[in-house]
Image (cartoon, coloured by chain):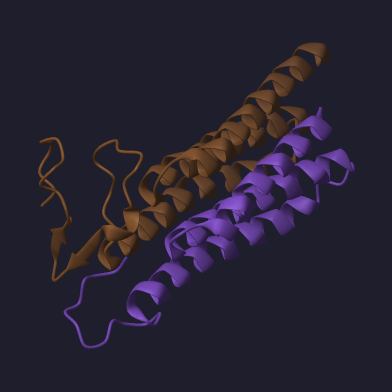
Chain colours: A brown, B purple
């Protein structure tokens, strides 16, 4: 029984560690702030919660487990809220999400003026979804 | 096994810190800092178990609270120039 609990706990800890590292790689590799939020979400919810669940299995039915459950619930509420606030602030500031794949594009050309999205030099691009 | 999880979290913290340092926009930095704080909470919990002192979880809980308030406050400050109410524009609502 003890061994089974240990194995479950190790599996959850390894799972959470792997998701944390995947999120970290995404934070480095993804191209703009809105896509990086996906990577942040992987680390903040799935990675952290899997690690906490592993610790819960390790702790058994004690006060420590209650604290871990509280932290898990709290993280599941607050981290998406914080990411949403950052996304909304970034959108309001004038960054616009990347909607097509062009490696040579200069992202600093994207600006937002008076509530309208403006994309300079958009005539020579492939026709895609509307940017407005 | 706790040591492996702690090492993975530390590696991830390094990657997130790279983004926080070289992030082109301030929102990249806010996002990376919030992510770093979450990883710190997780690391405190894991290190508490690693050292056999799960009382560290109290510290982790308080750190999670401060981290959330910090991310909201900094986002609001950067967008509006203040944390109370936007001045001189229409009220865009709470963020």
Specify whether B4 is left or right of A49: right
Location of residue B22 with respect to B43 vertically, above or below: below
Can residue A90 be seen at all in this image of the molecule?
Answer: yes
Coordinates of residue B59 in the picture (x, y in percent) = 73, 58
Q: Spot the residue most to the bottom.
A: B88
Q: Which residue is at a point 42% across and 46% down the rendered structure image? A: A37
Q: Which residue is at a point 77% across and 38% down the rendered structure image? A: B6
Question: Foreground residue, A3 or B17?
Answer: B17
Coordinates of residue A128 in the picture (x, y in percent) = 13, 36
Coordinates of residue A120 in the picture (x, y in percent) = 17, 57
Location of residue A107 with respect to A76 vertically, above or below: below
Question: Foreground residue, A96 or B90?
Answer: A96
Location of residue B94 with respect to B86 vertically, above or below: above
Coordinates of residue A19 in the picture (x, y in percent) = 58, 30
Where's the C terminus of chain B, which quadrant?
bottom left
Specify whether A89 is left or right of A45: left
Question: Foreground residue, A72 or A94?
Answer: A94
Question: Foreground residue, B52 or A10?
Answer: A10
Can residue A63 be seen at all in this image of the molecule?
Answer: no
Specify whether A106 is left or right of A58: left
Looking at the rendered structure, the number of numbered marks drawn on it comes to 0
Where's the N terminus of chain B, which quadrant?
top right
Q: Which residue is at a point 60% across and 57% down the rendered structure image? A: B64
Location of residue B55 with respect to A10 vertically, above or below: below
Q: Which residue is at a point 54% across and 43% down the rendered structure image? A: A28
């Amino acid at each position: 029984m003890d061994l089974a609990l240990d194995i479950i706990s190790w599996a959850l800890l390894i799972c959470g560690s792997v998701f944390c590292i995947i999120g970290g790689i995404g934070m480095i590799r993804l191209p703009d702030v809105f896509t990086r939020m996906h990577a942040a979400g992987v680390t903040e919810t799935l990675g952290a919660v899997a690690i906490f669940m592993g610790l819960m299995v390790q702790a058994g039915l004690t006060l420590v487990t209650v604290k871990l459950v509280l932290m898990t619930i709290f993280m599941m509420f607050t981290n998406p809220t914080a990411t949403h606030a950052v996304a909304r602030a970034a959108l309001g500031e004038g960054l616009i999400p990347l909607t097509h794949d062009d490696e040579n594009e200069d992202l600093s050309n994207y600006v937002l003026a008076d509530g309208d999205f403006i994309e300079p030099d958009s005539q020579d691009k492939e026709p895609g979804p509307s940017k407005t | 096994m706790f040591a492996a999880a702690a090492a993975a979290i530390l590696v991830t913290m390094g990657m997130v810190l790279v983004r926080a340092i070289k992030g082109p926009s301030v929102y990249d930095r806010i996002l990376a800092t919030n992510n770093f704080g979450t990883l710190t909470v997780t690391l405190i919990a894991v290190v508490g178990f690693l050292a056999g002192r799960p009382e560290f979880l109290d510290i982790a809980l308080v750190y999670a609270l401060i981290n959330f308030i910090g991310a909201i406050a900094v986002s609001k400050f950067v967008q509006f120039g203040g944390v109370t109410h936007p001045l001189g524009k229409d009220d865009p609502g709470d963020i």
